[in-house]
């Protein structure tokens, strides 16, 4: 009852912020240094999956700890990694053939 229709979010960021800052700084014409330590983004969704571009794709899971336990989210991360590994090895694989369970399970 009181739950919203959409409580999960998938974000594909198409701007490599760290690379842009490094490129801006490479000219040494600014006179100061910008250093990115941590970027904190907050949403009101119970689960947000963020895909970050770059030389290697990074995937970040942000979740509401009042809804999901950390061990559940760790299992989701392992399953997602397993799925992606299958897809890398066999890019033509069809979705029903993808096994999300790691060998240890």
Image: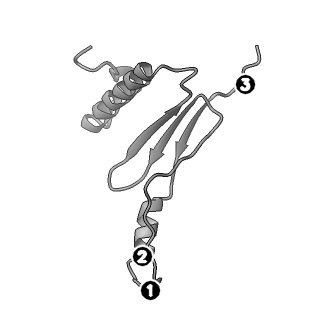
> Which residue is at a point 42% across and 41% down the rendered structure image?
59
Which residue bears the numbered disc 3? 4
> Which residue is at a point 52% across and 20% down the rendered structure image?
68
Per the model, the C-alpha gap separating discs 2 and 3 is 43 Å
Q: Are marks 2 and 3 in contact (CB under 8 Å)?
A: no
Q: Judge by depth and name the residue closer to the eye, 33 or 15.
A: 33
Report crowding for label 2: few under 14, some 14 to 19, many 20 or more residues within 10 A (C-alpha): some
**To which quarter of the image does residue 66 belong?**
top right
The quarter in which the N terminus is drawn is top right
Which secondary structure, mark 1?
loop
Q: Is 64 left or right of 55, judged from the image as shown?
A: right
Report crowding for label 3: few under 14, some 14 to 19, many 20 or more residues within 10 A (C-alpha): few
> Which residue is at a point 40% across and 83% down the rendered structure image?
28
Per the model, the C-alpha gap separating discs 2 and 1 is 8 Å
Q: Position of residue 57 (x, y in %)?
A: 37, 47
Q: Judge by depth and name the residue closer to the eye, 7 or 96.
A: 7
Residue 95 vertical position relative to residue 92 in the rendered view, above or below: above
Which residue bears the numbered disc 1? 29
Q: Are marks 3 and 1 in contact (CB under 8 Å)?
A: no
Q: Position of residue 31 (x, y in %)?
A: 45, 83
**To which quarter of the image does residue 80 belong?**
top left
The quarter in which the C terminus is drawn is top left
| Closer mark to the observer between disc 3 and disc 1 | 1
Residue 25 vertical position relative to residue 99 in the rendered view, above or below: below
Point out the residue furthest to the right here: 2
Which secondary structure, mark 3?
loop
Q: Position of residue 42 (x, y in %)?
A: 60, 42
Residue 40 vertical position relative to residue 67 in the rendered view, above or below: below
* Sequence-wise first label, 2 or 3: 3
Which residue bears the numbered disc 2? 25
| Closer mark to the observer between disc 2 and disc 3 | 2
């Amino acid at each position: 009852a009181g739950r919203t229709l959409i409580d999960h979010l998938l974000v594909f960021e198409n701007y490599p912020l760290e690379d842009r800052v490094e490129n801006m700084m490479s000219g040494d014409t600014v006179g100061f240094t910008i250093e990115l330590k941590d970027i904190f983004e907050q949403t009101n969704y119970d689960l947000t999956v963020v895909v970050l571009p770059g030389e290697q794709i990074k995937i970040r899971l942000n979740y509401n700890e009042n809804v999901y336990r950390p061990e559940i989210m760790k299992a989701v991360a392992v399953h997602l990694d397993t799925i992606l590994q299958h897809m890398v090895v066999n890019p033509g694989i069809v979705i029903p053939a993808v096994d999300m369970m790691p060998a240890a399970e």
